[in-house]
């Protein structure tokens, strides 16, 4: 059975469904009831019995037309379905008290079931009430009995409740299916948002790495060009080109590490900072003292990358603005928070060398603004400034 106005879309090809099964029962029931009723009636009542059966058959035919139009998305007014079911319930109800046509009362039960399943509560109750009223009218005409007074009205009420129960089950199933669809859509949107966020992080990391590598290569190429034009020292030129080759290799390696850090498991944060310290010592020939305070705990990959990038930028700035000085780097694990602090003297204590001035161009090009933006994206903060005779950079992210 299909509610009025809620039929499948036109062109639907599935023939065998619950509605087809119900119509098989209705047509089969009519085919059984007609000969059974005609066989039970006497010759004096045959015309009246035939009239009742003909009216019931026409109402069933109208019911079939209404269902067919609903399936073709061409529904007729809802009141016509209510009127048809009410008339079928009335005809079947009146026949309940008349022995020759008593079998027709099952069409009244079918009408009550369909009303409960297809119609809102008010019209469904009205159809059932019409059927009950028909039973009582039939009792007045043909004589009351226990079945007429109580039995058949109770059958119609139970039929209505059965139809309502099926309607409620269908509504719950539709709501559950809609909830599953919405849940899948929400999950799909979450996956899409996560993918876009990951792309953004990877793009940001690759941008920083390439900015660092290309700026360093640019400086080396310019230096090599100047050496070649001014002195023609091929030995110095070879050293510069070798250094440029190392910078290119380092840039490719760091690009792979940035992608790996965002897509897979990364080394612990202390190991990443220790690698930065070793690299700084190799490039600038100045010590970096790294200390870890507290029990090491897992850090989100994006937060870990942000802390490592911030520490790298701070080390590069220390080499540029306080060349020839030692740097102190602290990693502090506090409850719910991890902090990386880079500290160096505010001024250089001695003569500068080319390495001290950071002439390899190892800054990422973002500076404090870039570090702060990166940390804010992970819910962290950045502070940088003088503290006595030292310059302090402190990066924090929540665990």
Image (cartoon, helix red, strand yellow):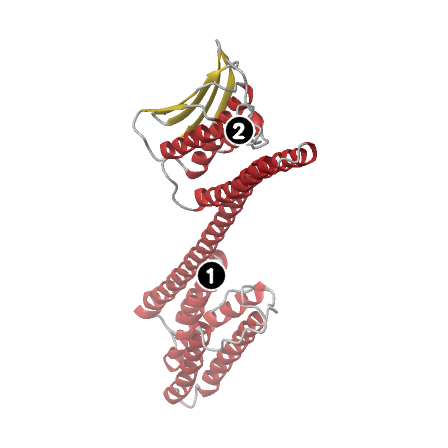
* Relative height, residue 213 to residue 7 (above, below): above
Describe the element under mark 2 as helix, strand or loop: helix
Q: Residue furthest right?
A: 229
Q: Tell me: 334 left or right of 6.
A: left
Residue sitting nearer the eye, 225 or 64: 225
Which quarter of the picture shows residue 299? top left
Q: Which residue is mark 2?
A: 371
Q: Which residue is mark 1?
A: 124
x and y percentages locating residue 24 in the rendered image = 43, 80
> How many marks do you count on the picture?
2
Query: Visible in this render: residue 58?
Result: yes
Q: Residues within 10 Å of mark 1 (few under 14, many from 20)?
A: many
Residue sitting nearer the eye, 110 or 184: 184
**Of circles 2 and 1, which is in front?**
2
Q: Residue at x 53, y 26 (%)?
A: 355
Alpha carbon distance from label 2 to label 1: 69 Å
Q: Residue at x 37, y 34 (%)?
A: 271
Q: Residue furthest top?
A: 388
x and y percentages locating residue 344 in the rendered image = 47, 18
Q: Residues within 10 Å of mark 2 (few under 14, many from 20)?
A: many
* For marks 2 and 1 on the same chain, the one whose residue lies earlier in the sequence: 1
Q: Tell me: 233 left or right of 341.
A: right
Q: Quadrant of the C terminus?
A: top left
* Relative height, residue 177 to residue 307 (above, below): below
Describe the element under mark 1 as helix, strand or loop: helix
Q: Residue at x 43, y 22 (%)?
A: 341
Which quarter of the picture shows residue 79? bottom right
């Amino acid at each position: 059975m299909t509610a009025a106005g809620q039929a499948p879309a036109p062109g639907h090809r599935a023939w065998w469904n619950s509605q087809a099964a119900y119509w098989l029962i209705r047509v089969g029931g009519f085919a059984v009831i007609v000969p059974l009723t005609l066989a039970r009636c006497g010759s004096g009542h045959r015309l009246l019995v035939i009239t009742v059966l003909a009216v019931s058959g026409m109402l069933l035919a109208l019911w079939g037309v209404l269902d067919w139009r609903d399936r073709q998305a061409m529904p007729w007014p809802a009141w016509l379905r209510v009127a048809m079911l009410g008339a079928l319930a009335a005809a079947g109800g009146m026949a309940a008290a008349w022995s020759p046509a008593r079998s027709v009362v099952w069409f009244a039960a079918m009408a009550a079931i369909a009303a409960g399943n297809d119609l809102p509560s008010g019209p469904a109750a009205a159809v059932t009430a019409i059927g009950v009223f028909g039973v009582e009218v039939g009792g007045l005409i043909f004589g009351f009995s226990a079945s007429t007074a109580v039995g058949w009205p109770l059958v119609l009420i139970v039929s209505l409740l059965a139809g309502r129960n099926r309607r409620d089950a269908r509504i719950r199933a539709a709501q559950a299916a809609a909830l599953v669809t919405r849940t899948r859509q929400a999950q799909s949107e979450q996956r899409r948002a996560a993918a876009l966020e990951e792309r953004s992080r990877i793009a940001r990391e690759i941008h920083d790495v390439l900015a660092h590598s290309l700026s360093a290569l640019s400086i080396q190429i310019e230096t090599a060009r100047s050496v070649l034009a001014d002195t023609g020292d091929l030995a110095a030129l070879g050293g510069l080109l070798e250094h440029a080759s190392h910078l290119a290799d380092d840039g490719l390696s760091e690009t792979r590490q940035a992608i790996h850090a965002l897509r897979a498991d990364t080394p612990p944060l202390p190991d990443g900072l220790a690698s930065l310290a070793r690299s700084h010592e190799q490039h600038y020939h100045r010590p970096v003292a790294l200390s870890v305070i507290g029990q090491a705990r897992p850090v989100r990959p994006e937060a870990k990358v942000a802390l490592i990038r911030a520490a790298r930028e701070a080390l590069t700035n220390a080499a540029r603005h306080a060349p020839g000085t030692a740097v102190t780097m602290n990693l502090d694990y506090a409850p719910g928070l991890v902090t990386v602090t880079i500290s160096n003297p505010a001024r250089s204590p001695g003569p500068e060398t080319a390495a001290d001035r950071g002439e390899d161009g190892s800054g990422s090009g973002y500076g404090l603004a870039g570090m702060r933006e990166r940390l804010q994206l992970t819910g962290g903060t950045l502070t940088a400034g003088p503290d006595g005779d030292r310059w302090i950079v402190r990066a924090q992210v929540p665990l």
